[in-house]
Amino acid sequence: MKTIVSRIAWLWILPVVLVAWEVSTRAAQAVYFPPPSVILARLHELWFSGPAAHVFLTDEAAHHLLPSLGRLVAGWAGACLVAIAAGIALGRSAVLCDVFSPLIHFFRSVPPPLLIPIFMTMTGIGTPLQLTAIVFGVSWPVLLNSLDGARYVDRQYLETCEVFGISRFRRLTRVILPAASPKIFAGLRISVALALIMMILSEFIGSTEGIGYRMLVAQSELDVPTMWTAIVLLGILGFVLNAAFLRFERHVLTWHRGARKTD
Amino acid sequence: MLEISDLTHSYGAYQALGGVNLTVAEGELVCVVGPSGCGKSTLLRSIGGLLRPTGGRVLVQGRPVEKVPDDLAIVFQDYSRSLFPWMTVADNVSLPLRRRGGDRRSRDTAAMEALEQVGLPAAAGKYPWELSGGMQQRVAIARALAYKPALMLMDEPFGSVDAQTREDLEDLVLQVRRSSGMTIVLITHDIDESVYVGDRVVVLSKSPATVVGDLRVELPEPRDQIATREHPDFVHLRAEVGRLVRGMRSGGPAAAETGAETGAEAEADSPELDPATAEPAPVAPKA
Amino acid sequence: MLEISDLTHSYGAYQALGGVNLTVAEGELVCVVGPSGCGKSTLLRSIGGLLRPTGGRVLVQGRPVEKVPDDLAIVFQDYSRSLFPWMTVADNVSLPLRRRGGDRRSRDTAAMEALEQVGLPAAAGKYPWELSGGMQQRVAIARALAYKPALMLMDEPFGSVDAQTREDLEDLVLQVRRSSGMTIVLITHDIDESVYVGDRVVVLSKSPATVVGDLRVELPEPRDQIATREHPDFVHLRAEVGRLVRGMRSGGPAAAETGAETGAEAEADSPELDPATAEPAPVAPKA
Amino acid sequence: ACGSSGTDEAKPAAGGAGLEKTKLNIGVVPVPSSAPLFIAKEKGFFKAEGLDITTETIQAPQPVMPKILNGGIDAFLTSYVSLITITDSGMAKLKMLAESQQGAPGVNGVMVTKDSPIKEPKDLKGKKIAVNVVKALGEVTVSAQLKIHGLAPSDVTFVPVPFADQLAQLKAGTVDAAWLTEPYISAAQKDLGARLLIDTLSGPTENLPLDGWATTADWVTKYPKTAAAFQRAIGKAQQIAATDRQELNKVIPTFTQIPAEAASTMAIGTFSTSLNATRIQRVADLLSEFQITKSKIDATTLVAAPSQ
Amino acid sequence: MTNARKALRGVLGVAGFLLVMEALGRTGIIDPYLIPLASTILTGAARLLTNGEFLSQVGVTLSSCAIGLLLAVAVAVPLGMAMGTVPAVERSLRPLVEFLRPIPSLALLPLAMFLFLSGEQGKIALIVYTSCWPLLINTLYGLRDVDPLAKETLRSFGFGSYDVVRLVSLPSAAPFITTGVRIAASVALIVAVSVELVAGGDGIGVFVTQASSGNRRDVVLAATLWTGVIGLLVNSLLAKAESRLFRWHRARAGEEAL
Ligand SMILES: Nc1ncnc2c1ncn2[C@@H]1O[C@H](COP(=O)(O)OP(=O)(O)OP(=O)(O)O)[C@@H](O)[C@H]1O
Ligand SMILES: Nc1ncnc2c1ncn2[C@@H]1O[C@H](COP(=O)(O)OP(=O)(O)OP(=O)(O)O)[C@@H](O)[C@H]1O
Ligand SMILES: [Mg+2]
Ligand SMILES: [Mg+2]
């Protein structure tokens, strides 16, 4: 009980920001910046005023929100698996790393909006395209962090492995992966928010549904409050996903917090 | 088991090993002593295949060391960095045992046994960072012992434990050696210890290190903390080793030639000599 | 200078310190000995304000330790982790001197001086990871010495150096103490060392640690590696400390009451006693 | 020409007197419709009016609305569809200063590949049609054409794909048809042998006004003389563009990356020299018919009457 | 010497990739109309080098990126330090940070354009906004990974928390932070180009807009290639600086092991 109260207390910044936002938008009177009360009202009307049987989701939400979320989760998970595996392989093999790093640094600097049409010619329209785009966009920070993490494993850990003839596989799973995990988790934490961004971006081109598509329509109709509901929705999603992620991380990195005496 | 000939190693411009020659027979326990920073750990790493020496040869079981030889264990000097903080103590000890085959159950039993031997049965479920320095060091020893290697390299393995635990661990090493017949190279700073546990004591000069003394220890077996240390040969040998080490430090090993007497530590420093002209001390006549 | 009363500390459910009482006068050098894992480092961290003990009080210069007391230096047991790998040895040593004010030049001179004292003038420009274990330990000592604190806490500061260097460092500590009057608490596993350098030797029981012995060392000053160690009081004291430590380890401290004799290590283990019922040993009558 | 609201006329124009504002930043889109502005610039028409013009490349007015509202951009090229949707959204009151292109055959159309099974418009039922932007000209004009063939907008799926990528998508088969404009139509014919399935500027959408130079109503009120000067300069250039294809061929490659050869062969709409509210009303009506705007916008409010 | 070998391997990797793409195109496995032949794109890219217009647009994008990245480092690293060392700051700001992070910069474009008169400033603001996050997160995680004994060492000498942060936490977390900088650098480039694509102004994105309006897909791809190459060059510069600065980090880690 007490922990719940203290947890909520830590959210003090949200009401403060909301009030400041409300006041400043009301003062500025700029059409582009509706006050949060208007946005929240629209958010409710647009997405959450559905029947109780549908967990209050409107048809609009079911049509646009759920597919987006599905792709988000699948794309993120896929990207993380691919990127961690590739990052560790490259981090542990100087040859592979030298051979592939120019290509990696090349591709991660190309703006996804320029590449999505090219993906589209291969995947067609729809979920495969969005998944590809999410995987592509999300992989880089995870890949880079895993690569660096796997590359700079304390030498003595590796020497210990060699001395005791620990097999390559165990070395990877029991030593290199945990040793790199603080850095990998940094990459994953970045990637959670990035996945949301890529989810939106991927729905800007060659898509006919999803939050991004809804945002695109709102943009071309200049339906400002709806544009803002999408932004707020993303923020809320980011907040929730991050909280879930931190729980998972706490669980996996218990040793690290103990060894590093953090919190 | 182990043949080292003309082994040299330089870190950049700095020469740490200046031509080390050493042979260790199967089942022997050789102690290496020498001044701080002389190159003992470097020598150990070369034997363990963790360092490619810049010159000379190391043969383990007749094969030149290119990579880490099979069936080897090392207790690192920097033990705290060689335990994995993400695993419990028991997992740290049992991890290498996969190599030995056997199921999980038998590995766990072997790990527990080794932890009991070093006096840490209660620490099995803890993480290394929850242990004191000496306890961590003992975990590192337990890991190496549980592994039962053919060749064990120990770099100051008892440096962080109290006197009594140290004696127990010395006896433990002797007992394990007796029962499994493993070959052991043990680096130590404690001259008494080197004489007590070693079949031979090898003395290195300051760096570039060379072997300046190689004394055979012929003390009655099995050794015993009380009886052995009271044995006149023990007292004589430790004085001799002390003199060799000391000689190295302040110059040449010439002083080692002066007769042995009890209380080596009480002896005055040997006169300053140019190490370049000094001859390596001969193997002690006692051998 | 230092007053510790009823100090307890628990790591979660595990109680490491079980009510430690200890007073150290200004300028005193107190050695703390005790079995591995008994809580010596924990005690040191509590004095240093790095750990908030779960019970009891620590006063340094009359003030309760809330944060790190002023004018303090610690030589950590895990010296290799306490040196900063991104700085040269000289920078590592001179870094704390920034707190003392003074210009760069004078800091560098002080750092070089300290490095010379520990025999490492040549290592000044190297990085810590280019040094051997013993050399790193000496750098950590040099750093603390250069800082010239009012209170110095040393956790097994000589564990990784050879016998001769160890003696030199012991003498160095004694000499610095004499010339600057600093108060020193030194943890060691070497009973001889505790008696040689200490004004008092405090013996801790196994954890939960309490003080089971507090012996005043009244050996002639200045101490001398040869003469002091041959002094009959030295031999007597080290046997006494040995017995206290040993008694702790195998159960209660009762064995400490049996008369002192030379060659304490040669003594048989005291009979197993329940530590819970055992009384702490009284302060040695010699004091 | 059509009358405009009284406020626009409030300040009597003292002919030739000093302008309220001489430095103008114009948002241009790199398409043929911007040509008159560059002609005017090149021929010194702006300078003659005392205007100093800078240009900034934009894609569409929607994303740069804040800049338009805060004065970062004075006037900009916009399609009528955007003009009307923006007005409908209530975000800003915009006014057309001058018209640019008006629809002509072959300028916009739905294309399919050479061997596509779609032979006539009604085959589009259930198909995916690529449009550059959703809820805009493409959707409206295609819907108007489909209506003739008995199809509702919901019978097809409009997929947003940038023009430049539509040809590749068409070839890859990821879309069944593409609503294209020039120069892409010519390119599709040349590269893919694509067929023009529907000319979307014919029949109900014939001669539909496409785009023009717009600004905010406030701006017109604040700078009436400047607005007039801009209109005069652009008007002259429109005249040239309307009559001299050679000039267009010359100027288009200078501000777009359309190669000179393509510029001279592609279809271009007509450049009208007047603002006609009745014509514009057709666009507004279409938009409201296909529910792209919520309300029916009165076209007369969208026009800033050109002054002499 | 090892550098030369590294570069050689990199060149081999790139050459291999190009050859495969070329072969796939030539054999018709990939329709060259959908993805033009590698050789076509390369020639196009080479031709762009003599295009003064393109070069000046590249200059614009690069300078916005550089300014944006510098500002982002100046904002995110100290903020990360504050959040990483004072738990109350971290817990308080976390909800806000986590709310803001997933908002795409493009969605905030109107806000940026509204707040900043010049398009250039708005673009830089968005670059700062977006590239802050990887920097912030990597800084936070880097601080968590600092050896507590190193911090205690400094504390034991009586240094205050500010000095501990400056003298120990920052240098130990530096390798983490530079990974963040490298991620942020490419993020900055991506944001710059994306904003230019949508909002216009000047820069590579605008050049791409112009090219695609002229149906010059070859030019678009060539410009795309150049953005990638620029990212690659920036990364190798940063990597070089990193290996210079953090020799100690590599020395401790078995970099060339395995
Ligand atoms: N961070 C920690 N978490 C949990 N338990 C700990 C922690 N640190 C120390 N301990 C426990 O507290 C006890 C005392 O530890 P401490 O490090 O003080 O021992 P010590 O006397 O210094 O031993 P040594 O001579 O081996 O260094 C040990 O049993 C250890 O397991
Ligand atoms: N990585 C390195 N780079 C450069 N020099 C090194 C490196 N490692 C060791 N040295 C140098 O080589 C010499 C021998 O080091 P080594 O660690 O072998 O000594 P040691 O005999 O084990 O000493 P100790 O008893 O203090 O552990 C030392 O002078 C040290 O400075
Ligand atoms: Mg060593
Ligand atoms: Mg300790």
Image (cartoon, coloured by chain):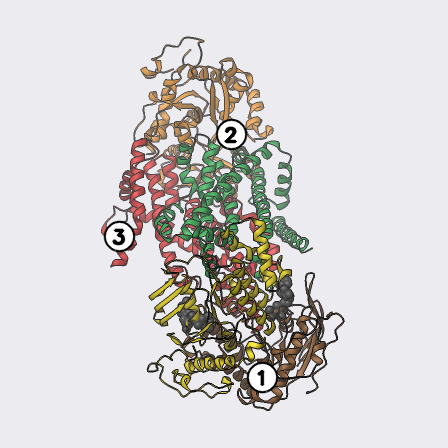
Chain colours: A red, B brown, C yellow, D orange, E green
Q: Which of marks 2 and 1 is in front?
A: 1
State the residue in front, D58 or A170. Answer: A170
- Residue at the disc numbered 3: A55
State the residue in front, D290 or D293. Answer: D293
Q: Nearer the viewer, mark 1 or mark 3?
A: 1
When the figure is inspected, residue D125 is found, relative to residue B209, above or below; the finding is above
Q: Residue at x 50, y 68 (%)?
A: B80
Measured as percent of width and height from the top left, residue E139 is found at 46, 51
For label 3, the SS is loop
**Inter-mark Cα distance, 2 to 1:** 90 Å
Chain letter behind tag 3: A
- Residue at the disc numbered 2: D30
**Inter-mark Cα distance, 1 to 3:** 78 Å
Three-letter amino acid code at the position of disc 3: Val
Measured as percent of width and height from the top left, residue C170 is found at 55, 70
- Would you call the spot at circle 3 few (<14 residues within 10 Å), some (14-19), or many (20 or more)? few
- Would you call the spot at circle 2 few (<14 residues within 10 Å), some (14-19), or many (20 or more)? many
State the residue in front, C135 or B136. Answer: C135
User: Mark 1 vs mark 3: same chain?
Assistant: no
Q: Is residue B253 visible?
A: yes
Chain letter behind tag 1: B
For label 1, the SS is helix
State the residue in front, B226 or A138. Answer: B226
User: Mark 3 vs mark 2: same chain?
Assistant: no
Three-letter amino acid code at the position of disc 1: Tyr
Picture quadrant of residue A228? top left
